[in-house]
Image (spheres, rainbow, N blue to C red):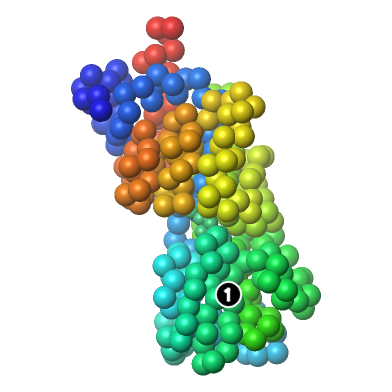
Amino acid sequence: ATPLALIRGGGKAADRGILMRSGDAFQIFPDVDHIVLDKTGTITVGEPAVSEVVAFGADEVDVLTTAASAEAFSEHPLADAILEFADEQDVEYADPDDFDSVTGKGVRATVASDDVLVGKPGWLSDEGIDLSKGSDDIERLQGHGLTVAGVVRDGDLLGLIGIGDEVKSDAAATIQRMRDAGITPVMITGDNERTADAVAEEVSIDRVMADVLPDEKREEIGRLQDEGHRVAMVGDGINDAPALTQADIGIAIGAGTDIAIESADIVLMGDRLGGVMDAYEIGNESYRKTR
Ligand code: ADP
Ligand code: MG
């Protein structure tokens, strides 16, 4: 690794909480024309919270208890949101008898000898679940930018949980800075298209890659590069590590996971999305004039 002091612009960057892990990231940055941003934790604050529970036939407590039991062993942020809400509502839930997490889709569990699935509607219908009684509500919740977890017990759709995550306060302004610099911002997410589009609209991002499985994020970056683009990727999760490595510049944001940080060229301390464009501008000032 290049010592920090030897990187042009490195001192100014460090002052703004931008750490360089690769010596040439600032040099490459002025040529970047696409910045791909993970949705959860990068554009949004990454603190999902339940905002609505919809029940079909059963009552809302039953929906929540069933979902909380199924998610009790999951480490996904959406599982945390469901468990936190169950606690707030003083709902008692048991540990599942059996549990499997299905990456990028949801969880499958055995709860009081019932088969329970909690996860994204697209996955549930691939599993043969009839979602027709929920389709209006699914559309409504997703249209508000909420992530929907369907709760299924023994093949029957019990209800829906709508989970929201606010966009960061500086997200829209940072996206505008990208556009002003002639860079195309792209949102990438494992979430469904309708939810992703609603969040993208809030921050004025036109290009959205939704329903992307964790191991497909890297391929999506590669596809942009194959089209001749220079691509920076911004992310915070374990999921994002291969894409951060694939990108011309990988940027880890916030507390991030260690794996994301290890895979990144630039690490932004703190949660501000604006650090991405601060880094771009420092790279531009330090290198553009000299070429
Ligand atoms: P992201 O790209 O937003 O970090 P993931 O790839 O982890 O998301 O998951 C993609 C989608 O799968 C989520 O938006 C959610 O709809 C669903 N999902 C994944 N894990 C869970 C879970 N434990 N409970 C409910 N839904 C889940
Ligand atoms: Mg993520």
The quadrant of the picture occupied by the N terminus is top left
| Residue beneath disc 1 | 118
Q: Residues within 10 Å of mark 1 (few under 14, many from 20)?
A: many
Q: Is residue 64 visible?
A: no
Residue 202 image point, x, y percent: 61, 48
Q: Is mark 1 within 8 Å of ligand 1?
A: yes
Residue 104 image point, x, y percent: 55, 60
Residue at 58% across / 44% down in the picture? 187
Image: 73 above or below 158: above
Image: 147 above or below 275: below
Judge left or right: residue 211 versus residue 85.
Answer: right
Along the line of sight, which residue is nearer the eye, 246 or 266?
A: 246
Along the line of sight, which residue is nearer the eye, 60 or 180?
A: 60
Three-letter code for the amino acid on which mark 1 is drawn: Val
Number of numbered discs visible in the structure rendering: 1
The quadrant of the picture occupied by the C terminus is top left
Along the line of sight, which residue is nearer the eye, 114 or 26?
A: 114
Image: 257 above or below 243: below
